[in-house]
Amino acid sequence: MELALHEYKAATNMTERFAALAAITQKPGKTCNDVWTDLYNKWQHDFLVVNKWFALQAMSDIPGNVENVRNLLTHPAFDLRNPTKVYSLIGGFCGSPVNFHAKDGSGYKFLGEIVLQLDKLNPRV
């Protein structure tokens, strides 16, 4: 974790920063939360970075990450009516084999709930 945190802080470009974040995201806790908050606070006005911010958190293979994704649905920067935000957060979640295909079915249940909501807002998504 220390190496990934060092790489995050020393990064000179977004590729390096997001590579470090991908590693940090796999270990939940205060450090991980602090780094996510730091990135959002610095880049909240850049929608491309915010979309990647959503996607990386959603892709985490931490067991039970579906609850973190549910919480991100209520984040002020997320809008279920915005297809790009949906693709970032929900698409990112579906890219996590551990959580989307969870043995308890929670990933499928979550996606089903979202699809029902999206169908009312924008059936094309």
Image: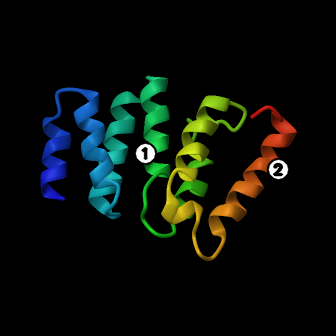
Q: Secondary structure at mark 2?
A: helix
Whether residue 22 is visible:
yes
- Note whether 13 is above or below 16 in the view shown: above
Could you classify mark 2 by the number of other residues whose Cα lies within 10 Å: few (under 14), some (14-19), or many (20 or more)?
A: few
Judge left or right: residue 15 versus residue 124: left
Question: Which mark identifies residue 66?
Answer: none
Judge left or right: residue 117 versus residue 15: right
Judge left or right: residue 99 versus residue 11: right
Quadrant showing the N terminus: bottom left
- Amino acid type indicated by mark 2: Leu
- Note whether 105 is above or below 50 in the view shown: below
| Residue denoted by label 2 | 116
Quadrant showing the C terminus: top right
Q: Earlier in the sequence, mark 1 or mark 2?
A: 1
Q: Secondary structure at mark 1?
A: helix
Residue sitting at x 18%, y 50%: 5
What percent of the width, then of the height, locates residue 70?
61, 56
Question: Which mark identifies residue 56?
Answer: 1
